[in-house]
Image (cartoon, helix red, strand yellow):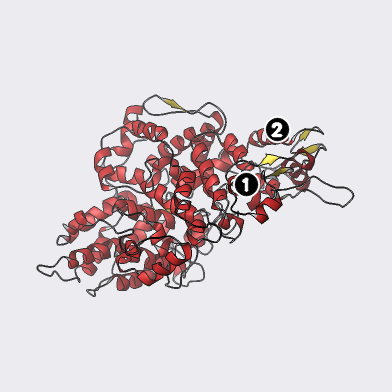
Amino acid sequence: MLIRGAVHTHERGANLASAVLLSVLILALGLPNSASAQSADSLFTSLLQSVQGIRDRTIDDNLSDPEVDALPFSSEVSTSRFLAQATFGATRSDVSSLVGTSVSDWLLEQFRESPSDYLATLDSYQAQLPFLILNPWNRQATTFAFWHHSIAGKDQLRQRMVYALSQILVISNAGDDALTDYPEALAYHQSLLTGFGFGNYRNLLEAITYSPGMGYYLTYMGNQKEDPETGRQPDENYAREILQLFTMGLVELNDDGTLVANVNGNDSSGELYDNDDITGLAKVFTGLDRNVTRAQSKNNPEAPEVLRSWREPMVAYPAKHSQSAKTFLGLTIPENTSAEDSITLALDHLMAVPSVGPFLSRQLIQRFTTSNPSAAYVARVTKVFNDGRYTLPNGIVVGGGLRGDLKATIAAILLDRENLEPEAPNTFGKLREPVLRFTQWARAFNAGTITPEYTLELYDLSSVSSYGQGLAQHPFRAPSVFNFYRPGYVPPGTNSGAAEMTVPELQIVTAETIPAYMNFITFFAMANTQHADLSTYREIGGLTGVNFDPELARTSFLPDYSYEKTLADDLPELFSHLNLLLASNAMSQEAVDSFIDVVAGVPVEAGEDDWRATRVGLAVALVMTSADYLVAY
């Protein structure tokens, strides 16, 4: 294994361990333009293949439904693995309590769980603020809400769906613009993804179309009809992206996600639409705007009606909506059709395009289970997406029976036989997203005080900070409508690329972001928030106008290592526990042995407890920066 011999040292400290692992990860992740990467970029090949020998259970393809119902929670290992896919991270209590139970019962319970309320969370933050516009807490409130709901929310599966959909139906507050100044817009978007996350994609798409956040982000808020006298034409931005990114993609797909063969018999599929289709569709999205005037927004930006206009659907202004015929994708909407009816007809027509099912199904699979799903896996999920129903292993049918049912689709993704037993294990799995690594840590070790407002390190994770920390990924802050990475990204100069595997997450893995993640997770693993610089938080308190105690910064996101510290003098047992909880037993014995050597360098001090916390924090950091952990199988 790549880890063997990489960290044979008895020197103390997480920084040293991270530095040693840096070179290992650069090799393992197969970065382009690295000479040694050509021989060591087998992370998605050799490591994925060898994991089958590490796991303690295999799954028969021809199992009865009762057996399938028991499989995800058949052992602690399988339970840890399933929860890593379906939640923001397994907890020790979940792993122990779910073993031997029914996955159908768990899914049904998650479907019934009350949704987290993003708008209410925004309200609770704003209630503490003496002013809103340009207030640092107000600008960060939707990020704060995400950490609360992803880490502590009971509706874990729904929130994972919210996070997945946020990377398809992208809006972002990265632009330091109205979406930053008015977090109501993004909170409303979050609430739509939450409310429709187990509903129908067609209904979600309509709600998003009327969303002021999307209207602002893709510039069709206030979009006006064509004017022959001035030459004005409707804004085409949303029309282009709803086709390319939100429904069908660029080219015609088979149900299994492969390209439809053209008339010459090759797989060079034809484009689904041209610029005339975009121009025709753009007329549909004219006349939508917030229900306040520009003068109201400018003169009193904190007026209740102005703030409310960012957190409710846009309305249609008939005088601004195109009354001409709208022709696209073989459909003509007659002239003098209202904005509301035009949108309904357009969305129905888009959803009927056969490529929608495989285009969306493959991306949802990528966000939950594997970056490179087989064509057969995509086809099975597409069928469920199109049928709108899925029969759970216990015989209960979920889904409303309409095309695009997301509840049925997520059940099909998680319980597909390729996920339970990969047909091609050397190409199955995904690089863990950086955000999901952090939430997993927080949930695994019960980071009790979830107060991101008191944790400056979480304010902006989209880039590397001045402290050399970052995730290259910040929730709801993608650099563009194309998300953090492209679903079809094939990493160049790697074995994965040579095998034509899609590994989207590798697009944000660079020589800069690797050590930034190491520094970030080591900071939290070593409980370094307890050493927060209080002067910084006093300054933030002054900027926000909030009356709060800066000392609270030193209790924010502190891990509860009470159980792990009891294992600090039994390192094989400690790493066995961490291997199960964090990596679902995917870590090789070679890696474990190397890490034991490192942690053993922290001496046992009689009568003191600090050495236990240091050993545990260092062990956690080593595991969560290892190649065996970073790939979820």
Hey, which residue is sitting farthest bottom in the picture? 11
Which residue is denoted by mark 1 in the rendering?
Answer: 212
Q: Where in the figure is residue 529, as x and y percent of width and height?
A: 33, 65
Which residue is denoted by mark 2 in the rendering?
Answer: 345
Q: Earlier in the sequence, mark 2 or mark 1?
A: 1
Looking at the image, which residue is at 19% across and 70% down?
A: 602
Left or right side of 398 for 567: left
Q: Residues within 10 Å of mark 2 (few under 14, many from 20)?
A: some
Please say whether residue 375 is visible from this viewpoint: no
Q: Residues within 10 Å of mark 1 (few under 14, many from 20)?
A: many
Instruction: Give the amino acid type for the residue marked by disc 1 in the picture.
Output: Pro
Disc marking residue 117:
none
Looking at the image, which residue is at 35% across and 57% down?
A: 629
527 up-or-down from 273: above or below: below
Q: How many marks?
A: 2
Looking at the image, which residue is at 51% across and 42% down?
A: 191
As measured in the structure, the alpha-carbon distance from the residue carrying label 2 to the one carrying label 1 is 21 Å
Q: Quadrant of residue 480?
A: bottom right
Instruction: Give the amino acid type for the residue marked by disc 2 in the picture.
Output: Leu
Looking at the image, which residue is at 25% across and 44% down?
A: 93
Which element type, helix, strand or loop, lies under badge 1?
A: helix
Residue 85 or 281: which is nearer the viewer?
Answer: 281
Residue 165 or 244: which is nearer the viewer?
Answer: 165
Which element type, helix, strand or loop, lies under badge 2?
A: helix
Q: Quadrant of residue 342?
A: top right
Q: Which quarter of the image is occupied by the N terminus?
A: bottom left
Q: Where in the figure is residue 485, as x and y percent of width and height?
A: 54, 56
The reply to whether the C-beta atoms of the residues labelled 2 and 1 are less than 8 Å apart is no
Left or right side of 259 for 438: left
Q: Where in the figure is residue 606, as x and y percent of width and height?
A: 9, 68
Q: Where in the figure is residue 298, as x and y percent of width and height?
A: 67, 56
